[in-house]
Amino acid sequence: MELSAKTKIDDLLRDYPFLLDFFIKRSPKFKMLESTVMRKTVGKVAPLSHVAHIGGIELGTLLSEIASEIKAKTGVEVAISTEAGPSGPVEDAEARQEILKGIIRDLHKGVDMAVLKQRFYELIKDIDATEIAKMEQKLIEEGMPESEIKRLCDVHVEVFKEALGEREVPSAPPGHPIHTFMKENRTAETIVQGLKAALERLCDTPEKEVFRQQKKELLDLIERLSSINLHYLRKENQLFPVLEVHGISGPSEVMWAIHDDIRQTLKYARAQTAELQVPLVYGTMKYLLQSVVDMIYKEEHILFPMAMEMLTDADWGKVKRGEEEIGYAWIEPERGWMPGAEGAPAEGKAAGQERLTLDTGHLSLEQVNLLLTHLPLDLSFVDEKDEVAYYSQTKERLFPRSPGVIGRKVQKCHPPKSFHMVQKILDEFKAGKRDVADFWIQMKGRFIHIRYFAVRDSEGNYRGTLECSQDVTAIRKLEGEQRLLDWD
């Protein structure tokens, strides 16, 4: 073998395995070579010119030392070429992904962030949002729990923050979903600043009476901030499903889990403020406000740039259609951008002229739709492939739905923490072990009954699951009888 700046580290270690100890002893920065994955991925494309740069060693010096080590161990003299090799960061896409994954794995093992930042800048330096999203996706596919990625998500961003900060946040025309999302973010920042200012005026440990005087202002601001739930719901039900079609689901799951944390923390902040739980509320509020700010950063430096790069106008049309059904946080979208015709709802027999022959009668399509949307409950149907096929568009749905869920795996339509429960219901229904699953919750002063039914054909084959959600608050209060019409 002839040593040169272009010699690949993997080739060198394959021919001379003992050089692994030499590299590790030569510089602590070469400790990454202990990883078989790093050697078989990055090592296949990383030449000795890069290796010398990482170790802070002059290339000629490193080549000479390697040649001396080979001679000492084998007695063989290897030639050294003076041909120049590549310099600068690693450009190979696969190698960059392995470097990023290696950095995050080491971060989760507790390796010092400063060391990892240095490795990042020496090997990559520049990075884009899509690379980070793909890296998180790969880690999840390779077995790293979504909860673990979520736990250190803010630290991940910190490692890459300087590189991300050098890139401009995405711009989109007025009316485009991204423009609307970012317009909401500006309002969210204003509300966060208002809450921070109110807390600073109160200091950290005020007397309860002083806190009581400011309670209404704080509760009003917390309630206003709570509208951010609509922002998150549109991401979860409109943007995430379209990204999933392009193979990006891991980062969405991580982000959804953080949304749920923010929602829960908002509830804690509201309750602690109302009950004057001083000074406990300060820690809750600081965590809440930082979480909201961090999410804005992740959206505008990772999620939105990646989505703008990956999605077509037709995709964005799917995102936009149905947004209004969920609603907007604080603002109304500006006029301007409109989706193209592709992906628009089909027309033709939508007027309902075609009649369906049912088991006990005949109904037009229009009548079927009217019947389903006038039932005093919300219906959703998931087919045998676990894909959402239908939901009833009632006037006041108990839980938000939008066209973005149609065709989506039902498992993806629930927060990550609910995945196992959803899967268990489906598995039991498919196995024929259960036919009904019942739940009831209290929400905004209402008592909600949620029921899941296994749908089977005449031969007993599983064909899907029907979800029925009903507000039974008034029903639970009924007593005695009412046999006469009580209209005035």
Image: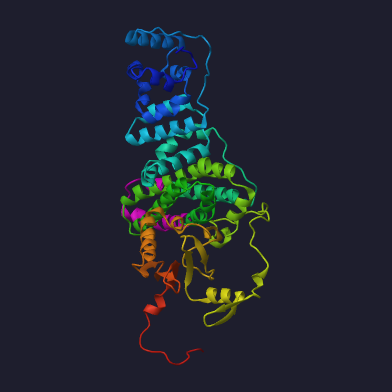
The answer to whether residue 292 of the structure is visible from this angle is: no
Compared with 163, 472 (above or below) is: below
Q: Name, please, the residue furthest toward the bottom.
A: 484
Q: Is residue 394 left or right of residue 32?
A: right
Between 234 and 104, the one nearer to me in the picture: 104
**Image-quadrant location for residue 277:** bottom left
Number of marks:
0
Residue 141: percent from left, percent from top: 42, 43
Residue lying at 41% horizontally and 75% vertically, measured from the top left = 472
* On-image quarter of the N terminus: top left
The one nearer the camera, 18 or 42, is: 18
Q: Is residue 391 visible?
A: yes
Residue 442 lies left or right of residue 348; in this view the side is left
Magenta segment range?
Answer: 198-225
Q: Is residue 218 magenta?
A: yes
User: Measuring 47% from the left and 73% from the top, which residue is drawn there?
Assistant: 377
Residue 393 in picture, x, y percent from top left: 54, 68
Q: What residue do we see at 58% from left, 60% from top?
A: 324
